[in-house]
């Protein structure tokens, strides 16, 4: 009897004085300013989601890990902090893996944290619950991959993951946390002391002065200079410096899709409406955070004025990029400038001096002239009001709504629904347009909507192809559950690209690109308490969008589009062997 009391007290003390793996993970994340987790609970991370929420981290629960992953990836892009996606083992991990690869390819900082099964059993392939060697599988698609086996190493593991995700060229990082780690308890003081608050996670990388000089000398020698802004430029949050560079030099610029709005698309130097003129005509091109990948036709071929599809067009290139390996990936780079975009642009603006020569007037006039013609042509098309509604008449409405709400985030995916939106809907502010990115991936839509609403608190407008929407459509429940100000506009043309294909055999199956005709996606939103609208005219679409923005209620507008209106593969018909033959 006499010994019972102290024992209880001692047990209490021991409990107080120890800390478990769950808590160390949560504390390590919080210590590094991570306030949101995008995930889906289950063994072995259910308690991690519960305890993270209890500790003040916002835990957003999705219906499928892929969407949580896309949300985390774009949160990383928008905030420059790694977006965290949390999944269960094997199948949950694999569902999240697509987004991890997407983050790596697009240079978005993201950490996929997955629970995993018992190492000994996995390594002997003895058939554990959800057994999989996740670390090995993640490695090829991640910028880095780590596993933590001991609670004492959680601090280091999370610090390494954060540094790998955001430093240099950002990317997707995998962090493997086996189930047994969470239950490990260690001395509380030692545990807390083992955590690391990462100092300067994405250090500035200052470009070499001689590289800056080489680049500016080349730029000043140009007769027909062009600047191309990529999403790396948008990521850099160097909006003032980039504007200063463009306006000081007076050089026409082309924004890549997610760089739209870095300077307003209506800026007099924006050459988007003259893209097919400026690319082959330019003599010196400065790429800022833009890679010469397929989206820029690899810097050669007919797009650039080359004779054949692999021929150099004769341009000289300046490439501003954080990665020293990027230069010469597709064509010769005459003046690489390596460093973080903000530091590079700042250095260039400073080196330009007050008296910066403007490009020759003939060049500026030629670009302006081309723009004027194309803008007038587009205005004519947009003014038409055909019945049924087509992409142009519907997107003319979206264009007006975005102009009136320049702070709104615009999420965009699809083929025609993507290409037409990109060219018709002007953006006015940086990092407002988020889309399919480097891979032209379908399925980012609803995950992006959730993250955009949560991170920015602004209204979100999503323009979605009906096929594209289907990849993540179930997350409308998530959007309703968290009552997010998201207005989804589905460009419903009954299928992939268009709804008019027929089965050549005459059999009962419809063609592979065709969906249920006249589907009512709006009812899906109503099922979860959101607002669903069926819109068949631009006027109905306009009213529904205005109502959605006024109310900030989750809204889905089923915009019925002429099913013959689209083209195969949107703008990238050339990559589609069968369409090319036609
Ligand atoms: C993950 C993934 N799967 C498939 C594709 C191929 N793909 C490209 S666009 C597209 C859908 C186009 O249809 P929709 O979204 O309805 O746009 P529309 O052209 O009809 O406006 C598909 C399936 C892809 N890009 N990504
Ligand atoms: Mg479609």
Image: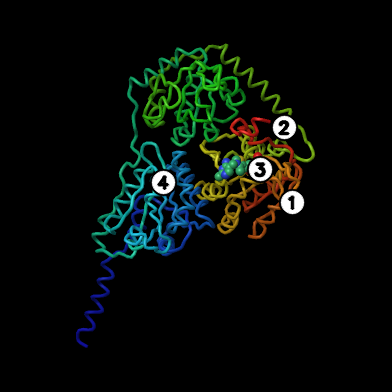
Farthest left residue in view: 2
| Label 3 – label 2 distance at C-alpha | 23 Å
Q: Nearer the viewer, residue 534 or 510?
A: 510
Residue under the point 35% across and 21% down: 211
Q: Do the numbered discs 3 and 2 sit on residues whose CB atoms are within 8 Å?
A: no
Residue under the point 31% across and 49% down: 197
N-term-proximal mark, 1 vs 2: 2
N-term-proximal mark, 1 vs 3: 3
Residue 47 vertical placement versus 385 (above, below)? below
Cβ of mark 3 under 8 A from ligand 1? yes
Tell me residue 454's x, y (percent): 51, 50
Give the labeled residue for mark 2.
382
Q: Do the numbered discs 3 and 4 sit on residues whose CB atoms are within 8 Å?
A: no
Task: Rate crowding at label 2 as few (under 14), some (14 to 19) or many (20 or more) other CA atoms within 10 Å.
Answer: some
Tell me residue 579's x, y (percent): 65, 33
Give the labeled residue for mark 4.
82
Task: Rate crowding at label 3 as few (under 14), some (14 to 19) or many (20 or more) other CA atoms within 10 Å.
Answer: many
| Label 1 – label 2 distance at C-alpha | 38 Å
Residue 187 vertical placement versus 521 (above, below)? below
Task: Rate crowding at label 4 as few (under 14), some (14 to 19) or many (20 or more) other CA atoms within 10 Å.
Answer: many
Give the labeled residue for mark 1.
508
Q: Image check: 339 left or right of 509?
A: left
Give the labeled residue for mark 3.
496
The way the protein has been coloured in the rendering is: rainbow
| Label 4 – label 2 distance at C-alpha | 40 Å
N-term-proximal mark, 4 vs 2: 4
Tell me residue 535's x, y (percent): 74, 47
Q: Nearer the viewer, residue 471 or 579?
A: 579
Which one is closest to the eye, mark 1 or mark 4? 1
């Amino acid at each position: 009897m006499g010994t019972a009391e102290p024992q209880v007290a001692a047990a209490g003390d021991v409990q107080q004085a120890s800390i478990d793996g769950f808590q160390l993970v949560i504390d390590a994340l919080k210590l590094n300013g991570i306030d949101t987790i995008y995930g889906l609970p289950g063994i072995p991370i259910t308690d991690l989601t519960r305890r993270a929420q209890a500790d003040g981290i916002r835990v957003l629960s999705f219906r499928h890990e892929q969407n949580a992953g896309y949300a985390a990836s774009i949160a990383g892009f928008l905030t420059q902090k790694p977006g965290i996606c949390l999944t269960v083992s094997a199948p949950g991990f694999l569902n999240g893996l697509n987004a991890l690869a997407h983050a790596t390819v697009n240079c978005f900082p993201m950490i996929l944290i997955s629970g995993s099964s018992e190492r000994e059993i996995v390594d002997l392939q003895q058939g554990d619950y959800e057994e999989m060697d996740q670390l090995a599988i993640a490695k090829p698609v991640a910028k880095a991959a780590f596993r933590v086996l001991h609670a004492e190493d959680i601090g280091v593991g999370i610090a390494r993951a954060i540094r790998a995700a955001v430093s240099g060229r950002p990317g997707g990082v995998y962090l493997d946390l086996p189930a047994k780690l969470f239950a490990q308890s260690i001395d509380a003081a030692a545990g807390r002391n083992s955590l690391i608050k990462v100092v300067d996670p994405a250090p500035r990388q200052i470009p070499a002065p001689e590289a800056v000089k080489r680049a500016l000398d080349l730029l000043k020698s140009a007769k027909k200079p062009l600047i191309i802004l990529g999403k790396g430029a948008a990521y850099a949050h160097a909006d003032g410096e980039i504007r200063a560079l463009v306006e000081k030099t007076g050089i026409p610029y082309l924004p890549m899709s997610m760089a739209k709005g870095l300077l307003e698309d209506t800026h007099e130097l924006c050459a988007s409406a003259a893209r097919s003129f400026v690319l082959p005509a330019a003599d010196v091109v400065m790429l800022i955070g833009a890679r010469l990948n397929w989206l820029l036709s690899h810097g050669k071929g007919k797009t650039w004025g080359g004779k054949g599809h692999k021929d150099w067009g004769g341009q000289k290139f300046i490439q501003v990029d954080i990665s020293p390996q990027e230069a010469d990936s597709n064509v010769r780079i005459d003046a690489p400038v390596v460093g973080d975009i903000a530091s590079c642009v700042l250095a260039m603006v400073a080196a330009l001096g007050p008296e910066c020569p403007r490009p020759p007037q003939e060049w500026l006039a030629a670009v302006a002239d081309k723009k004027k013609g194309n803008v007038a042509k587009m205005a004519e098309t947009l003014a038409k009001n055909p019945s049924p509604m087509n992409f142009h008449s519907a997107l003319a409405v979206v264009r007006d709504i975005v102009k009136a709400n320049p702070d709104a985030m615009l999420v965009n995916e699809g083929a025609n629904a993507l290409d037409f939106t990109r060219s018709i809907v002007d953006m006015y502010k940086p990092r407002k347009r988020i889309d399919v990115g480097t891979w032209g991936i379908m399925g980012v839509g609803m995950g992006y909507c959730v993250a955009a609403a949560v991170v920015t608190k602004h209204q979100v407008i999503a323009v979605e192809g009906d096929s594209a929407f289907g990849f993540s459509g179930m997350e409308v429940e998530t959007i309703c559950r968290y009552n997010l100000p998201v207005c989804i506009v589905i460009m419903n043309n009954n299928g992939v690209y268009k709804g008019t294909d027929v089965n050549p055999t005459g059999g009962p199956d419809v063609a592979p690109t065709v969906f249920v005709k006249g589907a009512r996606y709006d009812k899906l939103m109503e099922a979860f308490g959101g607002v669903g609208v069926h819109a068949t005219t631009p006027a109905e679409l306009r009213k529904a969008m205005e109502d959605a923005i006024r109310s900030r209620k989750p809204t889905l507008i089923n915009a019925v589009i002429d099913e013959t209106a689209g083209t195969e593969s949107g703008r990238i018909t050339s990559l589609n062997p069968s369409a090319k033959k036609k």
